[in-house]
Image: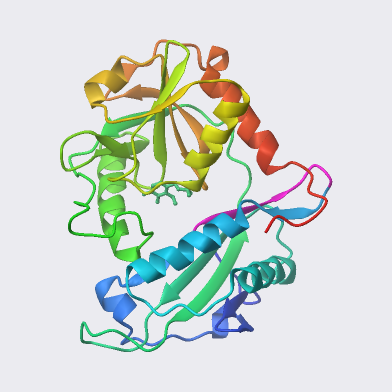
């Protein structure tokens, strides 16, 4: 998939510029040390035909919190960034899209703090993934970063080296995706998604502390409340997970995607008969629900 063509427009520090003509500094602290934060956001064509950025405010609030957690200066206003994002979508004729804001650092080869940060917002076409085949998941040999060594609840670029290693390992071994444990060996999350399992009419998801608390995870919990499905947030092991009726990943890009197996142990329930499938359908309805006003 091409992320851009010569006429693609990005938002760069207050201006709309052609991606092909935009420049950055090769001495940026972000490039050398992974010192940057980002978001992954989606927009959808609603049932009414308009474009809606799903949970825009939640994502931009998290972007700000991620930057502040890393001591990066942050001076942007969430509503202005949401408007800028809608403008990026319009200028690129996008409705179903993936949106990638990045906050990055100026040229600085030391570890000292900076007086300013920069922002870039790009977007590219991304269709609905729901209903794709169930995933074959592998427990990774890589664990998530120790929260005592990182700001694990921040969406920091440097953390994603861990995600890349785990995902590459799983795919090299013929699996679709990796599942990572935390430093104590409890189930944490996927390289870019949170995890839930279903057992006897109840859902269970890892407690916060060693994970990125996803916006989709929160949406799934909202849906569970509405559907009267009990959810527990607690620690559990891969052994317990393998005894589940069903399991799924959830994240902005992944949406809600069911698992076929973990480490070749197949989940016994028929996906279409599970509560997880009901949640998947409710999620799909929610992201494409007609919006009379823009969600901010
Ligand atoms: N965990 C990790 C490590 C992620 O990168 C993501 C994707 N942002 C998630 C969980 C899911 O978060 P969200 O639902 O906010 O996209």
Residue 179 is at least partly visible in this image: no
Up the image or down, 145 lies above or below 282; here it is below
Task: Indicate left or right for 14 with 203 as reference.
Answer: right
For the point 55% across and 27% down, the residue is 224
Q: Residue at x 39, y 34 (%)?
A: 195
Magenta segment: does it hold 47? yes
The stretch in magenta equals 40-48
Quadrant of residue 193 in the image?
top left
Give the answer, above or below, for where 171 lies relative to 122: above
Viewer-proximal residue among 34 and 133: 34
Q: Name the quadrant containing residue 76.
A: bottom right
Q: Determine whether 33 is above or below 172 in the image.
A: below
Pinpoint residue 97: horizontal percent, then vertical percent.
63, 55
Is residue 213 depicted above or below 67 in this figure?
above
- Do we see residue 151 in this rendering? yes
- Residue shown at the point (15%, 38%) measured from the top left: 184
Tell me, yes or no, whether the highlighted magenta stretch contains residue 225.
Answer: no
Image-based side of 182 in relation to 205, left or right: left
Looking at the picture, how far across and down is residue 119, in whole percent? 50, 77
């Amino acid at each position: 998939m091409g992320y851009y063509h010569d006429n693609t427009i990005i938002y760069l520090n207050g201006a709309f510029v052609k991606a092909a003509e935009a420049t950055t500094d090769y001495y940026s602290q972000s490039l050398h040390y992974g010192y940057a934060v980002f978001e992954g956001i989606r927009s959808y064509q609603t049932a009414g035909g308009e474009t809606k950025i799903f949970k825009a405010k939640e994502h931009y609030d998290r972007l700000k919190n991620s930057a502040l957690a890393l001591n990066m200066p942050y001076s942007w206003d969430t509503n202005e960034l949401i408007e800028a994002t809608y403008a990026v979508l319009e200028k690129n004729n996008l409705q179903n899209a993936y949106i990638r804001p990045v906050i990055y650092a100026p040229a600085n080869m030391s570890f000292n703090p900076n007086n300013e940060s920069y922002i870039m917002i790009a977007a590219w076409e991304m269709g609905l993934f729901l209903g794709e085949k169930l995933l074959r998941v592998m427990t990774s040999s890589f664990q998530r970063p120790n929260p005592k060594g990182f700001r694990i609840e921040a969406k920091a670029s440097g953390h994603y080296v861990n995600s890349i290693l785990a995902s590459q390992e799983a795919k090299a071994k013929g699996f679709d995706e990796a599942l990572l444990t935390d430093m104590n060996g409890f189930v944490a999350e996927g390289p870019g998604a949170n995890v839930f399992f279903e057992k006897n009419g109840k859902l269970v998801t890892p407690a916060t502390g060693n994970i990125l608390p996803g916006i989709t995870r929160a949406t799934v919990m909202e849906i569970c409340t509405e559907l009267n499905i009990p959810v527990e947030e607690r620690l559990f092991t891969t052994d317990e997970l393998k005894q589940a009726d069903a399991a799924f990943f959830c994240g902005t890009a992944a949406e809600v995607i069911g698992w076929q197996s973990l480490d070749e142990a197949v989940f016994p329930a028929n996906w279409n008969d599970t509560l997880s499938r009901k949640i998947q359908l409710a999620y799909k309805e929610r992201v494409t629900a007609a919006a009379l006003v823009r969600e901010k």
